[in-house]
Amino acid sequence: MSVIAPKFRLGYFLKGIFDNAFWILTIVTLAGIPAIQIVLFYLELPVIDGELLTAFLAFTWLFNPTMQVPLIKALIYSDLFRIVAFPGFGFAALIAAGTIFVERKMLAKLQLRVGPFYCGKVEGILQLAGDGLKLISKEIIIPAKADKPLFWAAPVLFVGTAAAFVALIPVAPGGWVVADLDVGLLAVFAVIGFFPIITILSAWSANSKFPFIGGIRALHQMVSFEIPLILSLLGVVILTGTLNLSEIVESQSSFPWIIFMPIGAIVFFTTMLAELERIPFDLPEAESEIVAGWLTEFSGMMYGLVQLGSYLKLYAFAALFVIIFLGGWTGPVFWPPLETELITEGIPIPNYAGDPILTVAAPGLPLLDQDPNEWVLQQQGELQYTSGQLLVSGVIWFVLKTVGVIFFILLPRGVFPRIRLDMLLHIGWYKLIGLSFVNIFIALGLVYAGVIGPGGIL
Amino acid sequence: MADALFLAISVLTIGSAIAALEMRSLVYGSIALMGTLGGVAGFYVMLDSPFVAMFQLAVYVGSIAVLILFTVMLVKRELIFKKIEDPKRKFAGIGLMLIVILALGAVIMDSGIKTISTDSDPVDFREIGGDFLTYYWPALILMALILAGSVMGALVLARREDTIENEQ
């Protein structure tokens, strides 16, 4: 017992702290500072107010209130921020983490259970952090006869492919997307095509029968549902005449496409459930038949990575549904414009007697406008909304719609049983492909009847 | 930058093509084949035609490579291949490849490819689509009919009477 939990002694405690501090300082001095300097040498630094931002200037400006806003602005509009934080990985991972928690809690409420309850006092809010810590601290076990390079590579590739999918999703107007491709929708199809390969390779490399059965099922399912998935989106491409996802969203400024093609939306939603391996199409991970399907042999953080990848994929599919059928970020702009006095002379704040004691001014604002002149134009009445206003309300609309779609993706898990493989293939090959062709013919009819498209009524 | 990228993609494509032929493990061979096809997609991107590149990825890497992997995993290797270690064959194959490459290269170099100006605008994929649906539509319809006919023929040939009777 004393081995597991030795008696607390202040001397040992202090020695531990000093040891850690010594080693951290040593490593930072010997490795960290040279590494930072080497990275700074290759980094392209932004120019703010006609001055090149060096590391020294950045540290100085961090504590200068008038320069903080331009500094943050330069950071927000850098490519690194796009890839790591906002429309890219960080944003998607945040939504994915929220999805995992909401899924557990919501399914529990649906099935009259309690769900995560004890972790974090309030409705188990810290359960996710606890699970993450558990996954990180668990041992990674690799089967003795597994094909090791492939087995190691599969989870990383899965997360990487899901992140590539996320990178194609535009989140807000004004080019808030990591990769704004002219052939964005085709790139989405190309990225979706990588998931079955990774699944089958990881299933084969585990060298165990349950993963292999699950992998073969996943392959059947994904390959056969990819065809209706692609066909169901072609109707929107015919109507808009573009493959760029941002342009598809902008074409829906007056009405979303789900009004004209509900059949396509239903087909896409069903194929989405199948591609995501969610109930009722979760045969590849059927836990009551084949342990955990193609995830059986993964342990520790490898399993965590695959789960992270699959939830990133869920977010990306829901966002794709929002972009193509629900109008993306379009919606009424409700974010108020900035007060003039706030930027020019500041707003005086009075005390109880009405005498102004304090003036609040933010000379560097507006923060989110790419072009600061937009704000001036808006004050003169030439511009209705600045890009900062559009960005904030657009992101809020986009997140609201995406969360709604994610809710409808999660909902069947609490309600439906799993369907048989032959029923699944029958649905995919007979019904969904036929329905998606019906959708394409509706789109063609709308174009040729002159309702939508070049020279149309709407 | 473009030269370095071109060299990197060339090394990837040719190296993984050689690996696809030389690997003992069929699964790794098909992964190397995927690398080759992906490298070809990279060439298309460098040639300013992302449309073709995305179709290359979606069709060849996403579908055909999956089919190859699927077949390789379901078939026992010993049944389809016998190991033949014959250096003569290897050298004959390499020689044949060199002859073919030289002949093709001579034909391509002779075809006036050097006179093409490289700074012209890339062809928009909308124009390609328009051409397909206006000028080339009989060829498209013909190809679709041939493909449909061959798929139906394959289904008829692959249909086995006994299994259907057993199911009932």
Image (cartoon, coloured by chain):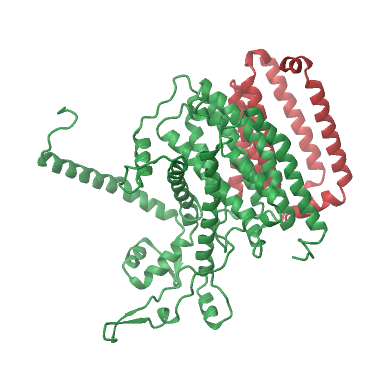
* Chain ID, green in image: A
Closer to the camera, A331 or A294? A331
Name the colour assigned to chain B in the rendering: red
Measured as percent of width and height from the top left, residue B47 is found at 69, 49
**Residue at point 54%, 63% (across, down):** A394
Task: Please say if A147 is above or below A365.
Answer: above
Quarter of the image for the N terminus of chain A: give it.
top left
A430 with respect to A30 (left or right): right
Q: Toward which corner of the image does residue B83 lie, by quadrant? A: top right
Closer to the camera, A435 or B27? A435
Quarter of the image for the C terminus of chain A: give it.
bottom right
Measured as percent of width and height from the top left, residue A390 is found at 54, 67
Q: Toward which corner of the image does residue B82 lie, by quadrant? A: top right
B127 with respect to A201 (left or right): right
Residue placed farthest to the front in the image? A112
Measured as percent of width and height from the top left, residue A400 is found at 52, 57
**Residue at point 87%, 39% (across, down):** B142
From this viewpoint, is residue A312 visible?
yes
